[in-house]
Amino acid sequence: MFSYKGLEQKLKERNVGRSELTKLLGLSSRTVAKIGRGEKLSRAVMEKLAGFFGCAAEELCREISDNPILQTLREEKDAKISGGLYHELQVRMTYNSNHIEGSRLTEDQTRLIFETNTLNLDDAVPVDDVLETVHHFRAIDYVIDCAEEELSEETIKKLHYILKHDTKDSALDWFAVGDYKKRPNTVGGKETAKPKDVPSRMKKLIGEYNAKKDVSINDIIAFHVGFEKIHPFQDGNGRVGRLVALKECLRFNVVPFIIEDGKKAFYYRGLSEWDNETGWLTDTCLDGQDTFKKLLAAFEIEVN
């Protein structure tokens, strides 16, 4: 559902009715009817409207989600509200996800970067730790923006690009930023998909997942396992995989889960032993979901 309150305000300021837009901008009556019904307009139409009113398209229209978590995140993100659910998601998920992968930044330092765009350091910290923290904030923003879109390879590759661009890895000829790996890699000592097999395996994994009718948290966890087994990127697979899980939870109105750094050993064990015992990883993710539910309760956000 889309709200066109911004557009209605602009029309009022110009003393122009919706029907007059058909003449002024050459819009069809069907397009004007979509505005009245709160339906999505094409990018071309939105750009035409924005050009006419001399403003950004985002000022004219905003998407309204039936998912109270996603709607709250979007409202707080757009309004730059501090201290709410969006704020805590950014800090807690970024700190934990990066720390699982070896970042030396503390949660307090991560919070300081998000809140003030500054950093106090007592010890030397790799520049990439700081860059990838800022990049992770932007990646969460991207997830919130595209949450309701069908999962695609393009979305997954975009997340990898957001995370890894401008890092030292991006200067390596053999490191593909925003694209699948060129060299073989392992995870936990186990072989992953060979570079030549990654495109076909990713296409199959995503296709089978998108074909599901009613997606549950168990389906999202299973997809996460499949993604990590393929390990499609040279590096950053864990963070990208957890961001994808966040996106899909928001897409299907499932309470998200945050894997805390303190549960890293259980998380890795669950991934490693999935084929023998699915319960270990499932329990770890459900524990992370319980943590998120406490955040929702703290901010008085009710979910079904």
Image (cartoon, rainbow, N blue to C red):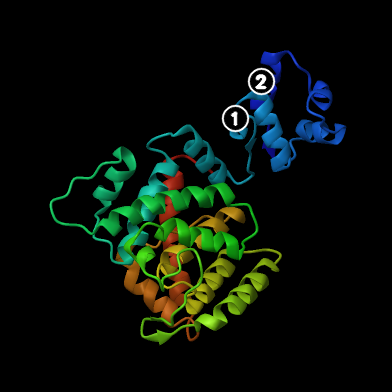
Q: Amino acid at mark 1?
A: Glu
Residue 256: x and y in percent read 50, 56
SS for dot 2: helix
Q: Quadrant of residue 42?
A: top right
Which of 45/170 is in front?
A: 170
Identify the residue at image location x=60%, y=46%: 67
Residue 72: x and y in percent read 52, 40
Cβ atoms at labels 1 and 2 below 8 Å apart? yes
Which residue is under mark 2? Answer: 10
Dot 2 surroundings within 10 Å: few (below 14), some, or many (20 or more)? Answer: some
Q: Is residue 230 above or below residue 156?
A: below
Residue 88 falls left or right of residue 108 = right
- Residue 26 is at least partly visible in this image: yes
Identify the residue at image location x=51%, y=50%: 142
Which residue is under mark 1? Answer: 59
Residue 187: x and y in percent read 39, 80
Which mark identifies residue 42? Answer: none
Real-space Cα separation, disc 1 to disc 2, in angstroms? 9 Å
